[in-house]
Image (spheres, helix red, strand yellow):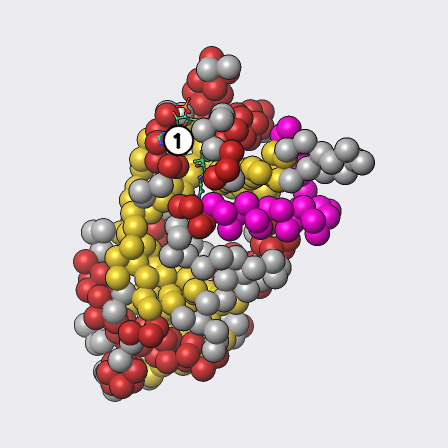
Amino acid sequence: MVREWDPRTASSAEIGSVLDTLNAVLAADLPQDPPWREDSLREYLSEVMPGERRISWVAEDDPPAGGGHGTILGHVHVLLLGDIGVLEVLVHPAVRRSGLGRELVRTAARRVYQEGFQSIGVEVVGDTPAIGFYSSLGFTREYVETRSVLDLGTVDWTALTEMAAGVDPGYHLEFYPGGPSDDLIEAYARAKAEVRDVDDGELRPSSYDPQRLRDSLDTLHRRGMKPYIVLALQERTGTVAGLTEVVVPVQHPTRADQYDTIVVRDHQGYGIDRAIKARMLLELRSAEPELTEVQTWNAQANEAMLKVNAELGYQADRDWCEYSVDVAELVHRLDAQR
Ligand SMILES: CC(C)(COP(=O)(O)OP(=O)(O)OC[C@H]1O[C@@H](n2cnc3c(N)ncnc32)[C@H](O)[C@@H]1OP(=O)(O)O)[C@@H](O)C(=O)NCCC(=O)NCCS
């Protein structure tokens, strides 16, 4: 049975059941990824940016004879933002290939259609059943990135310390656990605006205006995801010349996510990208003692970033794709397949 589900009011048993399915999915599809923990999972599933909405459904097996809910074996949610619905679907490996995934997509797609949205996007991990699944539903690939993972156990910390110090003397680096201080937000947002072109086509929106940036940092905190920032500041002007962002989610604190790294065009060629990334890893080593890995996503065309990542020891792991489909076409196709 598929029913609409609100993680904010769900019982702890239901949250635990979603977690079990998520971890079974990870064990089957991405066995090298760390299992998730229950810490702030409810908030992770319910908190959104201002102006966005997330609608969720679960599929469960038969409820126990004495009443109550069954075990959750499938979960779908759609995040409504701009004119697109971003979909996430999970089906427990024990019940795959029985049409449940398609049923969950049908339920979500109908709602997205009723809400007047044009298209649905989804992140699809290379070399997993999701590729065949979304292709069978008429989704097409829009964009592909490479996920790379750095095992901190392989890092040469002495070389990294030299890299962090290797920035041109016209600049200095600053570390901000929790996010940039409020007086730096405007300069930070200006620097982030530079990646707009690079990020075009990505589902993960970048934050460029100061209020959106504040909202985005606040949302991260509410979802249990702790941001860390290293900034490169130009000595002479105080301008933000470069920044790098890492988020440590409380749901999987052994593996952090590297978000944007940006060097503002006028400040390129001064060793800033290497230095800020190296400094970040040095800081994380003491700030997050549980951390053992960092993962990052890069466009395959971004050769400069891939080169720096390779120097730091990142190993390419998987293709990470964005697929999309026209909502009306999807609803039509799914209804015709019934
Ligand atoms: C992708 C996923 C949702 C599919 O769920 P499912 O219930 O097995 O899918 P369905 O049974 O509805 O399959 C519908 C159609 O999709 C296609 N399909 C599904 N799995 C497939 C596979 N492994 N290979 C090829 N095609 C596949 C088939 O055409 C299938 O129809 P058929 O069984 O009649 O041939 C499920 O595998 C899953 O949860 N994957 C993890 C997704 C994810 O987001 N992971 C993130 C971390 S890895």
Check disc 1: other Cα within 10 Å, few if <14, some if 14-19, many if 20+: some
Name the amino acid, label 1: Phe
Quadrant of the rendered structure where residue 242 is?
bottom left
Kindly tell me whether residue 8 is visible in this rendering: no
The outermost residue toward the front is 65
Q: Is residue 9 magenta?
A: yes
Residue pictured at 37% horizontal, 80% vertical: 282
The outermost residue toward the right is 66
Quadrant of the rendered structure where residue 329 is?
top left
Q: Is residue 163 magenta?
A: no
Which quarter of the rendered image does ligand 1 occupy?
Answer: top left
Q: Position of residue 153 (x, y in %)?
A: 33, 74
Q: Position of residue 107 (x, y in %)?
A: 57, 27
In the displayed structure, 201 sits above or below 65; it is below
In the displayed structure, 272 sits above or below 98; it is below
Quadrant of the rendered structure where residue 97 is?
top left
Kindly tell me whether residue 247 is visible in this rendering: yes
The outermost residue toward the top is 336
Q: Position of residue 98 (x, y in %)?
A: 49, 26
Q: Which residue is mark 1?
A: 133
Q: Is residue 16 left or right of residue 226?
A: right
For ligand 1, tell me if the residue under mark 1 lies within 8 Å. yes
Q: What is the total number of numbered labels drawn onto the structure image?
A: 1
Instruction: Point out the stretch of residues depicted in magenta.
Output: 1-25
Q: Is residue 59 left or right of residue 226?
A: right
Q: Is residue 229 left or right of residue 71?
A: left
Q: Position of residue 226 (x, y in %)?
A: 52, 67
Residue pictured at 48% horizontal, 74% vertical: 290
> Considering the numbered disc 1 on the image, is that residue within a helix, a strand or a loop?
helix
